[in-house]
Image: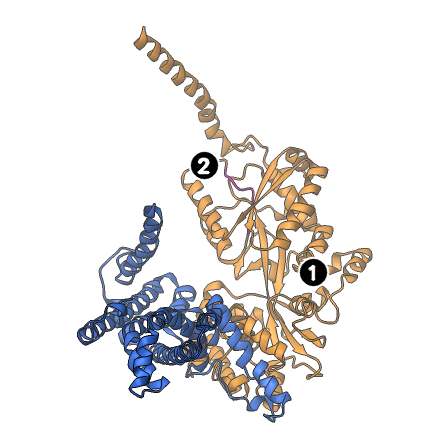
Chain colours: A blue, B orange
Amino acid sequence: MVVPALASVVVLFFGGMYHGLLQSLGLAPLQGDPSFTFQYYSELIHSQDFWRSFFLTLRISILSTTFSAGTALFALYSLFLIRTRSTRDRSVYFQRFFQISMLFPYIVAAYMIFLMFVQSGWVARVLFNMGLISRMHSFPIITNESFGWGIILAYVWKTSPFIVLLLYPVLLRVEKGWLEAAKVFGACSFSAFREIALPMMKRPLMVASFIVFAYTFGAFEVPFILGVTYPKALSVYSYQIYTSGDLSEQPLAMAINIIILLTILMAGLITFITASSNRNWMETPWTDL
Amino acid sequence: MQPRGGNYIMKKGLFLLLLVLLPLVLLLPFSTHSGITSAGEPDLKSSEWQDVIALASGQTVHMYMWGGNNGTNLFIDEWVAPRLLDDHRITLKRVPVTDIREMINKVLTEKQMKKEKGSADILWINGENFRLAMENGLLWGPFISLLPNYREYIDPDAEDLKYDFGTDTQGYEAPWGKAQFVMIYNSEKITEPPLSLAELMNFIRENPGRFTYPSPPDFTGSCFVRQVLLENYGSYGKYLDLKAKEQILQKKADSWDLLNKMKPYLWREGNTYPDSVGILDQLFANGEVWFTMNYNPLHAYNQVRNGLFPETTRTYVFRSGTFSNTHYLAIPFNAKSKAGAMVAINLLLSVEAQIEKFKPHVWGDGMVLDSSALSEEQMEVLGRIYLGPYSLPPEELEKSRVPEFSSQEIEMIEEEWMEEVGKK
């Protein structure tokens, strides 16, 4: 039963990657004879445009992941309070509420951020009509600026609920008895959260953060809508080369995609090593995700 | 008995095969020289139109076209097809494709396989695809001067019909419709729209932050950049004459210089540009900028009707003209129903069909007719199509049409813009 689904994933996903790898190495050209070369990679490594895009993308991904994890932890702390402060556990409803933004596709999220935060957007208009800003143009520029705040905002909005979703089950494993015990020793709610829930969440949090990083590093639509003309995020840069250049430049776009892939693999490796080196002092049966 | 029976059947089969092949083999040498085509039709190029119509009767015509626009599809299925069937007993079958390039490749394969009876009778193409088809001898023609409606209503010398993205059509494709670049502005903020680059430059100096254009390779932004080049080149004719490379390079450098001088007065001081025309439309709708632009001349009308653009939206074109591109209908070299295809294309070029297609609620596609060839009555029908004050009537647009640069040239301009303007 699994075979057809698995086969299509293997063929389309790995097949595409394999073909991209071949193309980036000059082994599957659209015209001319195949010959093995690192020419496209060395062209990228010597290109200033590439490095500007690379570091922009890296910065956006790291900041998005950090802010997203921070927002998620704050939400989890709130859920923890709701759960521990009352006799009936209502946190599950609030947890559902946090998932709303996961229903929207990224492209919708990006467009919504644009409509809300552009200088003539909803937020600026509301502030202007309330008299809080004197001119629409005194609203700060958040979308389409070179730092990438708009992109980060869209990613945090979209991905923090995902982290909450992955970590919430861990929160449910915190038993009332432990909290009672913590109170006996004089711990307040925050220190109980920090001392009991947080260590349990550490490994799932690392895994969830890695997933967010991997997605934000390779995704296309959000930086396409909220980015600037130059420098572009790697995926947008690759897309631009792929579509507007002539056919002989396609291997360059593929080489960028392979570099994106390698970066994500590297990040995955680092996550794995850190997570397993922490395992010894963290080893508790319920932290396995 | 068994082996003999098998042998007998085989022999009979072989005989039948030979019987079928023999006439074909005999016909082959004649088909290229005599006036009889391999399909057994008389040479259409020297036939009277009456004979073409007679021949077309009962034929089935397969029209391969991009199927992504509902209005276009309905127009073919509900307006064109019934008329062809009633008037000429021609069955028109619309075959939707996502990219007509696939069909060009198919005809190319058919040619390599020497397939005389192809699958397509009409192709809807332009630009790069037409150039490819011509270079590989995939089209049948020249045929357009045989069509009565072409002779009567279409100006054969119009540059924008004759050159398809820089390629001479040589009568191998019939112009069917067109799009034209227009500028759109908010008349509440602007009383006199700037009709030239110099005026635009003055305007944005006085009103900084109120103008921008989508960054190429966005299709619309790329066209705005070409408008700047066009005005620096002087005119399209001059551009074609500018064989001297140095002159072109100088003109280009001037254009990049001008666009860089514009930068501090653009939206966001030119630090970034909208990445697509959709974003620019949104900024225009919000009132953040006062201009937008589009390659569909009826865009303003449609967006006002959709409630996105304000009622005060107006359209204009530059004094030096604006780019327009034409899309065409062609007949593959191996079409089965060439006569039927010709009659169908002739109907699509008729005044009635062109006006119907132009109506914004039907499709809103630009007409290829020469308005001076239309009767007063026909002009009146045209005048009754309501475009509001938002979009320009076809006769206004017609006065300022300029044909497009070649597709290779366009690609080069987009890359140079990024290097010379976008990054700076």
Where does residue B53 sit, x and y in percent of width and height?
A: 68, 37
The chain letter under disc 1 is B
The chain letter under disc 2 is B
Above or below for B219 versus B134:
below
Which numbered dot is residue B323?
Answer: none
Question: Is residue B60 found left or right of B5 in the rendered image?
Answer: right
The magenta span reads: B118-124
Question: Is residue B163 found left or right of A32 in the rendered image?
Answer: right
- The answer to which quarter of the image holds residue B311 is bottom right
Which residue position is annotated with label 2?
Answer: B115
Above or below for B126 versus A103:
above
Decide whether residue B136 is among the magenta residues: no
- Residue at horizontal 46 percent and vertical 53 percent from the top: B132
The three-letter code of the residue at mark 2 reads Lys
- The answer to which quarter of the image holds residue A198 is bottom left
Which residue position is annotated with label 1?
Answer: B360
Is residue B244 visible in the rendered structure shown here? no
